[in-house]
Image (cartoon, grey):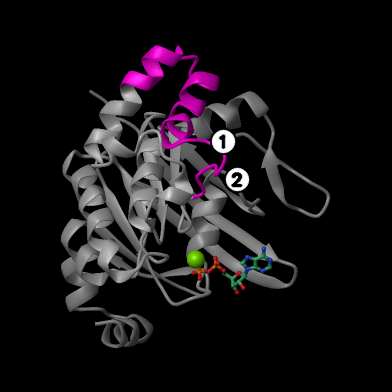
Amino acid sequence: MAEAPPALEIRNLHKRYGELEVLNGISLTARDGDVISILGSSGSGKSTLLRCVNLLENPHKGEILVAGEALKLKAMRKGELIAADNRQINRLRSEIGFVFQNFNLWPHMTVLDNIIEAPRRVLGQTKAEATEVAEALLAKVGIADKRHAYPAQLSGGQQQRAAIARTLAMQPKVILFDEPTSALDPEMVQEVLTVIRGLAEEGRTMLMVTHEMNFARQVSSEVVFLHQGRVEEQGSPQQVFDDPQSARCKQFMSSNR
Ligand code: ADP
Ligand code: MG
Protein backbone atom coordinates (compact mmCIF):
# COMPACT_ATOMS: atom_id res chain seq x y z
CA MET A 1 0.00 0.00 0.00
CA ALA A 2 1.25 3.47 -0.84
CA GLU A 3 2.26 5.56 2.13
CA ALA A 4 -0.29 8.22 3.09
CA PRO A 5 0.75 11.75 2.10
CA PRO A 6 2.08 13.90 4.95
CA ALA A 7 -0.50 15.90 6.90
CA LEU A 8 1.38 19.05 5.96
CA GLU A 9 4.21 19.70 3.59
CA ILE A 10 5.93 23.02 3.03
CA ARG A 11 8.27 23.21 0.06
CA ASN A 12 10.83 25.93 -0.52
CA LEU A 13 8.81 28.74 1.02
CA HIS A 14 9.98 32.30 0.47
CA LYS A 15 8.53 35.48 1.90
CA ARG A 16 9.78 39.04 1.99
CA TYR A 17 8.54 42.29 3.44
CA GLY A 18 9.77 44.93 1.03
CA GLU A 19 13.50 44.33 0.78
CA LEU A 20 13.62 42.17 3.86
CA GLU A 21 13.84 38.46 3.07
CA VAL A 22 12.06 36.85 6.00
CA LEU A 23 11.73 33.27 4.74
CA ASN A 24 14.54 32.06 2.52
CA GLY A 25 13.39 28.71 1.23
CA ILE A 26 11.89 26.74 4.08
CA SER A 27 10.88 23.13 3.62
CA LEU A 28 9.18 21.11 6.34
CA THR A 29 7.19 17.91 6.44
CA ALA A 30 4.76 16.95 9.20
CA ARG A 31 3.53 13.39 9.02
CA ASP A 32 0.44 12.26 10.90
CA GLY A 33 1.11 12.48 14.61
CA ASP A 34 4.26 14.55 14.30
CA VAL A 35 4.80 17.29 16.84
CA ILE A 36 7.31 19.71 15.37
CA SER A 37 8.66 22.46 17.55
CA ILE A 38 9.99 25.53 15.81
CA LEU A 39 12.65 27.43 17.72
CA GLY A 40 14.65 30.50 16.88
CA SER A 41 15.47 34.01 18.04
CA SER A 42 13.00 36.82 17.78
CA GLY A 43 12.73 37.91 14.15
CA SER A 44 13.96 34.62 12.70
CA GLY A 45 10.69 34.14 10.81
CA LYS A 46 8.79 31.68 12.99
CA SER A 47 5.46 33.50 13.02
CA THR A 48 5.72 34.38 9.37
CA LEU A 49 6.27 30.73 8.53
CA LEU A 50 3.14 29.62 10.40
CA ARG A 51 1.10 32.51 9.01
CA CYS A 52 2.09 31.69 5.45
CA VAL A 53 0.82 28.13 5.83
CA ASN A 54 -2.80 29.24 5.83
CA LEU A 55 -2.16 32.43 3.89
CA LEU A 56 -2.61 34.84 6.76
CA GLU A 57 0.53 36.16 5.06
CA ASN A 58 1.23 35.73 1.38
CA PRO A 59 4.47 34.01 0.45
CA HIS A 60 6.38 34.86 -2.74
CA LYS A 61 7.44 31.39 -3.67
CA GLY A 62 6.90 27.84 -2.60
CA GLU A 63 4.28 25.17 -2.22
CA ILE A 64 2.02 24.14 0.62
CA LEU A 65 0.31 20.74 0.63
CA VAL A 66 -2.30 19.62 3.13
CA ALA A 67 -2.76 15.86 3.18
CA GLY A 68 -1.19 15.77 -0.26
CA GLU A 69 -3.43 18.47 -1.72
CA ALA A 70 -1.47 21.42 -3.08
CA LEU A 71 -2.81 24.82 -2.19
CA LYS A 72 -3.65 26.56 -5.46
CA LEU A 73 -1.76 29.81 -5.66
CA LYS A 74 -1.51 32.62 -8.17
CA ALA A 75 0.96 35.48 -8.37
CA MET A 76 -0.04 39.08 -7.85
CA ARG A 77 1.78 41.85 -9.67
CA LYS A 78 4.28 42.44 -6.88
CA GLY A 79 5.01 38.74 -6.76
CA GLU A 80 2.96 37.74 -3.74
CA LEU A 81 1.14 34.46 -4.04
CA ILE A 82 -2.52 34.53 -3.15
CA ALA A 83 -5.17 31.84 -3.11
CA ALA A 84 -6.30 31.01 -6.62
CA ASP A 85 -9.39 29.16 -5.46
CA ASN A 86 -11.43 30.68 -2.65
CA ARG A 87 -13.41 27.55 -1.97
CA GLN A 88 -10.24 25.53 -1.62
CA ILE A 89 -8.49 27.97 0.71
CA ASN A 90 -11.59 28.23 2.90
CA ARG A 91 -11.78 24.46 3.14
CA LEU A 92 -8.06 24.05 3.81
CA ARG A 93 -8.10 26.85 6.38
CA SER A 94 -10.77 24.94 8.25
CA GLU A 95 -8.44 21.93 8.27
CA ILE A 96 -5.51 23.90 9.66
CA GLY A 97 -6.10 25.03 13.23
CA PHE A 98 -4.29 28.12 14.46
CA VAL A 99 -3.72 28.99 18.09
CA PHE A 100 -2.38 32.49 18.59
CA GLN A 101 -0.29 34.01 21.32
CA ASN A 102 -3.12 36.39 22.22
CA PHE A 103 -5.97 33.89 22.06
CA ASN A 104 -8.03 35.89 19.55
CA LEU A 105 -11.38 34.97 21.04
CA TRP A 106 -14.32 37.14 20.00
CA PRO A 107 -14.87 39.43 22.99
CA HIS A 108 -18.59 39.94 22.39
CA MET A 109 -19.38 36.21 22.41
CA THR A 110 -19.52 33.75 25.27
CA VAL A 111 -16.98 30.96 25.35
CA LEU A 112 -19.57 28.51 24.05
CA ASP A 113 -20.61 30.81 21.21
CA ASN A 114 -16.95 31.33 20.29
CA ILE A 115 -16.60 27.59 19.90
CA ILE A 116 -19.80 26.77 18.03
CA GLU A 117 -19.65 29.64 15.54
CA ALA A 118 -17.32 28.15 12.95
CA PRO A 119 -18.58 24.55 13.17
CA ARG A 120 -22.09 25.87 12.50
CA ARG A 121 -21.15 28.30 9.75
CA VAL A 122 -18.37 26.36 8.04
CA LEU A 123 -19.09 22.71 8.82
CA GLY A 124 -22.87 23.13 8.74
CA GLN A 125 -23.45 21.61 12.16
CA THR A 126 -26.73 22.30 13.91
CA LYS A 127 -26.64 24.37 17.06
CA ALA A 128 -27.38 21.25 19.11
CA GLU A 129 -24.61 19.21 17.45
CA ALA A 130 -22.05 21.99 17.74
CA THR A 131 -23.01 22.61 21.37
CA GLU A 132 -22.62 18.98 22.30
CA VAL A 133 -19.14 18.86 20.76
CA ALA A 134 -18.20 22.19 22.34
CA GLU A 135 -19.27 21.08 25.82
CA ALA A 136 -17.17 17.93 25.52
CA LEU A 137 -14.18 19.99 24.39
CA LEU A 138 -14.61 22.48 27.21
CA ALA A 139 -14.62 19.59 29.66
CA LYS A 140 -11.52 18.20 27.99
CA VAL A 141 -9.61 21.48 28.44
CA GLY A 142 -10.97 21.84 31.97
CA ILE A 143 -13.24 24.88 31.69
CA ALA A 144 -16.73 23.38 31.32
CA ASP A 145 -17.97 25.72 34.04
CA LYS A 146 -16.97 28.76 31.96
CA ARG A 147 -19.14 28.05 28.96
CA HIS A 148 -21.43 31.04 29.49
CA ALA A 149 -18.65 33.42 30.48
CA TYR A 150 -17.23 36.08 28.18
CA PRO A 151 -13.51 36.03 27.39
CA ALA A 152 -12.79 39.09 29.53
CA GLN A 153 -14.13 37.20 32.55
CA LEU A 154 -11.53 34.45 32.10
CA SER A 155 -7.88 34.30 33.10
CA GLY A 156 -5.33 34.19 30.31
CA GLY A 157 -4.82 30.49 30.79
CA GLN A 158 -8.55 29.85 30.61
CA GLN A 159 -8.84 32.01 27.49
CA GLN A 160 -6.09 30.09 25.80
CA ARG A 161 -7.72 26.78 26.73
CA ALA A 162 -10.99 28.10 25.28
CA ALA A 163 -9.12 29.06 22.11
CA ILE A 164 -7.68 25.55 21.88
CA ALA A 165 -11.19 24.09 22.30
CA ARG A 166 -12.40 26.39 19.53
CA THR A 167 -9.66 25.14 17.24
CA LEU A 168 -10.39 21.49 18.06
CA ALA A 169 -14.08 21.98 17.29
CA MET A 170 -13.14 22.35 13.61
CA GLN A 171 -11.53 18.89 13.60
CA PRO A 172 -8.31 20.19 12.08
CA LYS A 173 -5.81 17.90 10.39
CA VAL A 174 -2.95 20.02 11.65
CA ILE A 175 -2.76 22.54 14.46
CA LEU A 176 -0.34 25.47 14.36
CA PHE A 177 0.58 27.08 17.68
CA ASP A 178 2.37 30.41 17.71
CA GLU A 179 3.86 30.88 21.18
CA PRO A 180 0.67 29.76 22.90
CA THR A 181 1.98 30.49 26.40
CA SER A 182 4.06 33.62 25.80
CA ALA A 183 1.29 36.04 26.76
CA LEU A 184 0.48 34.21 29.99
CA ASP A 185 1.44 34.95 33.55
CA PRO A 186 3.92 32.28 34.68
CA GLU A 187 1.45 30.50 36.93
CA MET A 188 -0.85 29.85 33.96
CA VAL A 189 1.69 28.42 31.59
CA GLN A 190 1.51 24.85 32.89
CA GLU A 191 -2.26 24.49 32.58
CA VAL A 192 -2.01 25.32 28.89
CA LEU A 193 1.04 23.15 28.30
CA THR A 194 -0.81 20.27 29.96
CA VAL A 195 -3.61 20.59 27.43
CA ILE A 196 -1.16 20.73 24.52
CA ARG A 197 0.72 17.73 25.91
CA GLY A 198 -2.56 15.82 25.96
CA LEU A 199 -3.09 16.63 22.29
CA ALA A 200 0.41 15.40 21.48
CA GLU A 201 -0.32 12.16 23.31
CA GLU A 202 -3.53 11.74 21.32
CA GLY A 203 -1.42 11.76 18.18
CA ARG A 204 -2.48 15.14 16.85
CA THR A 205 -0.27 16.64 14.18
CA MET A 206 1.11 19.95 15.39
CA LEU A 207 3.62 22.64 14.52
CA MET A 208 4.48 24.68 17.54
CA VAL A 209 6.52 27.83 17.95
CA THR A 210 7.56 27.95 21.56
CA HIS A 211 10.16 29.22 23.97
CA GLU A 212 9.31 26.49 26.48
CA MET A 213 12.45 24.46 25.96
CA ASN A 214 11.76 21.66 28.42
CA PHE A 215 8.29 21.21 27.06
CA ALA A 216 9.53 21.16 23.46
CA ARG A 217 12.11 18.56 24.39
CA GLN A 218 9.49 16.34 26.02
CA VAL A 219 6.67 16.44 23.47
CA SER A 220 8.36 16.98 20.10
CA SER A 221 9.02 14.30 17.56
CA GLU A 222 11.20 16.81 15.74
CA VAL A 223 12.77 20.17 16.46
CA VAL A 224 13.52 22.79 13.85
CA PHE A 225 15.77 25.74 14.55
CA LEU A 226 15.27 28.76 12.31
CA HIS A 227 17.85 31.44 11.72
CA GLN A 228 17.27 34.35 9.34
CA GLY A 229 14.46 32.56 7.59
CA ARG A 230 16.34 29.34 7.00
CA VAL A 231 16.22 25.97 8.67
CA GLU A 232 19.58 26.11 10.37
CA GLU A 233 19.26 22.86 12.25
CA GLN A 234 16.70 20.08 12.39
CA GLY A 235 16.47 16.75 14.12
CA SER A 236 15.21 14.82 17.11
CA PRO A 237 14.95 16.75 20.40
CA GLN A 238 18.02 14.85 21.63
CA GLN A 239 20.04 15.90 18.60
CA VAL A 240 19.03 19.53 18.54
CA PHE A 241 19.01 20.19 22.29
CA ASP A 242 21.92 18.05 23.40
CA ASP A 243 24.19 18.01 20.40
CA PRO A 244 23.53 21.02 18.18
CA GLN A 245 25.86 21.25 15.22
CA SER A 246 25.60 24.82 14.02
CA ALA A 247 27.22 27.64 15.96
CA ARG A 248 23.97 29.64 15.98
CA CYS A 249 21.96 26.77 17.35
CA LYS A 250 24.60 26.02 19.99
CA GLN A 251 24.53 29.63 21.09
CA PHE A 252 20.74 29.73 21.14
CA MET A 253 20.58 26.58 23.23
CA SER A 254 23.15 27.76 25.73
CA SER A 255 21.40 31.13 26.19
CA ASN A 256 17.93 29.60 26.54
CA ARG A 257 18.42 26.99 29.20
P1 ADP B 1 9.53 35.61 14.84
O1 ADP B 1 8.14 35.12 14.97
O2 ADP B 1 10.55 34.52 14.64
O3 ADP B 1 9.94 36.51 15.97
P2 ADP B 1 8.51 37.08 12.58
O4 ADP B 1 8.11 36.04 11.61
O5 ADP B 1 7.43 37.74 13.36
O6 ADP B 1 9.64 36.51 13.54
O7 ADP B 1 9.27 38.23 11.83
C1 ADP B 1 10.37 37.97 10.96
C2 ADP B 1 10.88 39.30 10.41
O8 ADP B 1 9.87 39.87 9.59
C3 ADP B 1 11.20 40.33 11.48
O9 ADP B 1 12.33 41.05 11.03
C4 ADP B 1 9.98 41.22 11.47
O10 ADP B 1 10.31 42.51 11.88
C5 ADP B 1 9.54 41.17 10.03
N1 ADP B 1 8.10 41.34 9.87
C6 ADP B 1 7.15 40.54 10.39
N2 ADP B 1 5.92 40.94 10.04
C7 ADP B 1 6.11 42.05 9.26
C8 ADP B 1 5.23 42.93 8.57
N3 ADP B 1 3.90 42.76 8.59
N4 ADP B 1 5.78 43.94 7.86
C9 ADP B 1 7.12 44.10 7.81
N5 ADP B 1 8.00 43.32 8.44
C10 ADP B 1 7.51 42.29 9.15
MG1 MG C 1 6.69 35.34 16.42
Residue under the point 33% across and 39% down: 146
Distance (Cα) linking label 2 and label 1: 10 Å
257 or 81: nearer the eye? Answer: 257
Question: Is residue 190 on the magenta stretch?
Answer: no
Q: Quadrant of residue 36?
A: bottom left
Question: Is residue 130 on the magenta stretch?
Answer: yes
Q: Can you see residue 121? A: yes
Question: Disc 2 vs disc 1: which is toward the camera?
Answer: 2
Relative placement, left or right, of 3 versus 16 is left
109 or 192: nearer the eye? Answer: 109
Relative placement, left or right, of 52 versus 198 is right
Residue under the point 55% across and 60% down: 48
Relative to 203, say whether 154 is above or below: below
Q: Residue 16 at x, y = what percent?
A: 67, 64
Question: In the image, is the residue at mark 1 within 8 Å of ligand 1 by its beta carbon?
Answer: no
Magenta part of the chain = 104-132
Q: Amino acid at mark 1?
A: Leu
- Find disc 1 in the rendering and name its residue: 71
Q: Are marks 2 and 1 in contact (CB under 8 Å)?
A: yes
Residue under the point 45% across and 55% down: 27
226 or 46: nearer the eye? Answer: 46
- Find disc 2 in the rendering and name its residue: 55
Residue under the point 56% across and 64% down: 23
Q: Residue 220 at x, y = what percent?
A: 23, 57
Mark 1 secondary-structure assignment: loop
Q: Amino acid at mark 2?
A: Leu
Residue placed furthest toward the right: 77
Q: Can you see residue 10? A: no
Q: Residue 89 at x, y = what percent?
A: 59, 32
